[in-house]
Amino acid sequence: MRGLAVVGLAALLLAGCGFHLRSAHEFALPASLSVLRVRMPSSGLKYPGLVLVVRHALEDRGVRIADHGKAPTVVLGGEMMTPVIVTLNSNGGASAYLLDYAVTFSLVGPGGRLLMAPRTVRVQREYSFNPENVLAMAREQSYLERRMRVSAARQIVWALAAYKGPLVASAGSAAPHKSHAP
């Protein structure tokens, strides 16, 4: 009974200070992005893993995914997964790694107009390495990589939810993107 009272008091205090749990409506995408395409030109596969994860994350937010047509396109650049040794054991071997995952994305409108400049999303996770259990470590790394893709996809969706650029219907009035080569 006392525990219930403590939980209730904590909930009242959090609600009083303006704290709210995240919900789907808080990260809704603009109506102009209600239909999107997702592409990863650098991949030879029609639907590489990251594309599927981003598509699912967008669908979870109510976005309809189009394979063709004049919908704005989320263009995913190359993804990089870099393991960095964080700790060495007494034998000089790695005992902990930091996985650094980075992916670049942009939003392109119909006709190739750049609606959102390329941005890089980065996710990092640390994991311990046990040389006596290599198979389990490989499974753990694979699991972390999948979870990192999901986190990156979520960050991409949040960035798209903050999109305040031209509406796609009136995107014809937006100035075309000009590339500035160094």
Image: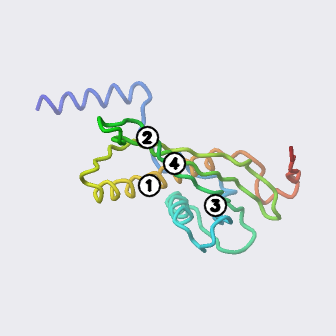
Residue 11 at x, y percent in the picture: 30, 31
Q: Residue at x 66, y 58 (%)?
A: 33
Question: On the rendered image, what quadrant is the N terminus found in?
Answer: top left
Label 1 Cα neighbours within 10 Å, binned few <14 / some 14-19 / many ≥20:
some
Q: How far is disc 4 from disc 1 in space, using C-alphas?
A: 10 Å
Q: Secondary structure at mark 1?
A: helix
Q: Amino acid at mark 2?
A: Ile
Q: Residue 169 bears which disc, if any?
A: none
User: Which label's residue is closer to the chain start, 4 or 1?
Assistant: 4
As measured in the structure, the alpha-carbon distance from the residue carrying label 2 to the one carrying label 1 is 16 Å
Is disc 3 placed on a helix, strand or loop?
loop
Q: Nearer the viewer, mark 4 or mark 2?
A: 2
Q: Which residue is mark 2?
A: 85
Q: Is residue 44 left or right of residue 17?
A: right
Q: Amino acid at mark 3?
A: Ser
Residue under label 3: 34
N-terminal of the two: label 3 or label 4?
3
Q: CA distance from mark 3 to mark 4?
A: 34 Å
Tag 3 near tag 1, CB within 8 Å: no
Q: Which residue is mark 4?
A: 82
Secondary structure state at the residue bearing disc 4: strand
The amino acid type of the residue labelled 1 equals: Glu
How packed is label 2: few (under 14 Cα within 10 Å), some, or many (20 or more)? Answer: some
Q: Nearer the viewer, mark 3 or mark 2?
A: 2
Task: Give x and y (percent) for residue 106.
Answer: 69, 53
CA separation in Å, label 3 and label 1 = 29 Å
Observer-nearest of 76 and 89? 89
Decide if residue 56 is on the left or right side of residue 78.
Answer: left
Q: Give SS at disc 2.
A: strand
- Asked if 101 appears above or below 168 in the picture, the reply is above
